[in-house]
Amino acid sequence: MQKEVFLKNLGERIREIREGKGITQKQLAHAIDKDQQSIQRLETGKINPSIYYLHEVAHGLEVELATLIFNDSKL
Amino acid sequence: MQKEVFLKNLGERIREIREGKGITQKQLAHAIDKDQQSIQRLETGKINPSIYYLHEVAHGLEVELATLIFNDSKL
DNA sequence: TTAAAACACAACGGATATGTTGTATTTCTC
DNA sequence: GAGAAATACAACATATCCGTTGTGTTTTAA
């Protein structure tokens, strides 16, 4: 399933960015008024998040939204 | 209200790209196995689309996904 | 090794995205 | 202006997101 792979890759990328910032799922969640479980589902690719949700996550990570989206091949 | 502005800008950007390609909402929709009304809701900012939906739209427009959200990420 | 912290999993409920059908309005072409 | 094409609007059904609670599992730190 192309979709599952896409979402898993997206989640892994977000996790890498978060870990690069040295913050926990809980810290990221609270920074954008969400909770740990919500971030966990995102990072494990269990959901197909809305663009605005990702916009909020990008804000919490202090990166551009496009940064979350770029393919690894482009970095 | 920030959300509504974000989604409206995203929709307008997608519409500009589609019109730049010289195709109709119906043509774009059919190219990605959706229908015209779905694209219409997207372009008018009436919905908060999922990232995978936008991925499909990007494919239909033959552009990178990041292209669709690049401007909005700079708001 | 034990306790705490971090992360994962499941389920439930309200909200909403999306596919779909039908139709109205606007825009284009003649 | 008439007819066609393109776009917009509404409503319904189904699926799923997301917030939330509860709890299980893994990792870290002492």
Image: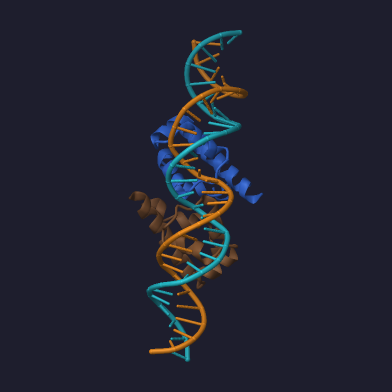
Chain colours: A blue, B brown, C cyan, D orange
Count of numbered circles in the view: 0
Can residue A64 be seen here? The reply is no
Q: Quadrant of residue B32?
A: bottom right
Can residue A61 be seen here? The reply is yes
Image position, residue C30 (x, y; %): 47, 91
Image position, residue B73 (x, y; %): 41, 51
Above/below status of C8 relative to A75: above
Residue at 56% from the left image edge and 49% from the top image edge: A71
Residue at 34% from the left image edge and 50% from the top image edge: B2
Q: Nearer the viewer, residue A65 or D9?
A: D9
Q: Nearer the viewer, residue D9 or D24?
A: D9
Image position, residue A18 (x, y; %): 48, 35
Image position, residue C12 (x, y; %): 52, 35
Residue at 43% from the left image edge and 39% from the top image edge: A61
Residue at 49% from the left image edge and 54% from the top image edge: B66
Above/below status of C21 relative to B66: below
Above/below status of B57 relative to D26: below
